[in-house]
Structures are given as C-alpha cells and as structure tokens.
Amino acid sequence: MNNKNFILQQLKWISIYFAISIVISFIIPFPYSIIVIIPVVLFLSFYIRRKEMRKFGGVENFSMFNSNKVNYYCMVCGTKHDNLMCPKCGSKMKRIG
Ligand SMILES: [Zn+2]
C-alpha cells in the first residue's frame, strides 16, 4: 500500500465517521448525540486499527521471514544456493545452514 492509498483510506474513514456523526445527531438531540457518537467512533477506530494491524503485522511477518531467510547448502559439495538443484554439481540434496 502506498502513501496515496493510505491517505485515501484515512479520508474514507473520516468521511464514514462524519456520516455516522450526522446520522446519529439526526436521530438523537445534540448533547446526547455526543455521548453516543464518541463510543461509536472509538469502537470503530479500535476495530479498524485491529484490522489494519493484522494486515501490517502480516506484511511485517512476511518481510521478517524474508530477511531471516535460511541458507541452503549442497550436501555434496557444500555450495550455498537457493535453487532446487545445486548449480555446481546438480545435486538435489540440501541441508539448512
Ligand atoms: Zn553441489
């Protein structure tokens, strides 16, 4: 997700909050509407953050997985490689090192 998308996402949620606030203030008269709007918005932002965290957490896990990538060494000649077959001797036997 790039920055522009992130901003658009934020704007989308802000307009949703805004719409919810307007709808609630139509249904409920002013001082009480605030009492209803605040927990609703808090709940929504909590819910969204959790959803977003899960998404970002997933991405983070993925990059961590990539950076901590295990190295494979050929069991025959000891060459470090990522391929299915050893580029040096063609052996498919690998060990994790
Ligand atoms: Zn080899």
Image (cartoon, rainbow, N blue to C red):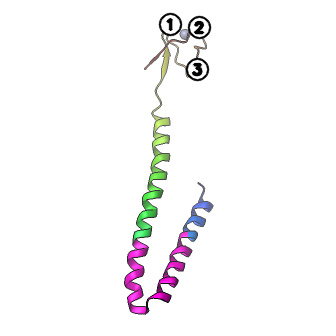
Marking on residue 83: 3
- Measured as percent of width and height from the top left, residue 44 is found at 44, 69
Q: Earlier in the sequence, mark 1 or mark 3?
A: 1
Ligand 1 picture quarter = top right
Number of the label disc, if any, that sits on residue 53? none
**Relative to residue 68, is residue 91 drawn left or right?**
right
Q: Amino acid at mark 2?
A: Cys
Residues under numbered marks 2 and 3 in contact, where contact means CB atoms less than 8 Å apart? no
Q: Is ligand 1 within 8 Å of the beta carbon of the residue shown at mark 2?
A: yes
**SS class, disc 3:** loop
Query: Helix, strand, or loop for circle 1?
Result: loop
Q: Position of residue 63 (x, y in %)?
A: 49, 41
Position of the C terminus, as image quadrant, is top left
Task: Rate crowding at label 3 as few (under 14), some (14 to 19) or many (20 or more) other CA atoms within 10 Å.
Answer: few
Q: Are marks 2 and 1 in contact (CB under 8 Å)?
A: yes
Task: Identify which residue, 82 or 84, lies in the foreground.
Answer: 84
Q: CA distance from mark 2 to mark 3?
A: 12 Å
Mark 2 to mark 1 CA distance (whole Å): 8 Å
Estimate how packed mark 1 is, as few (under 14), some (14 to 19) or many (20 or more) residues with alpha carbons within 10 Å.
some
Sequence-first tag of 2 and 3: 3
Q: Position of residue 4 (x, y in %)?
A: 62, 62
**Which residue is at 49% across, 16% downward?**
73
* Region of the chain picked out in magenta, as a range: 13-42
> Label 2: which residue?
89
Question: What amino acid is at disc 1?
Answer: Val
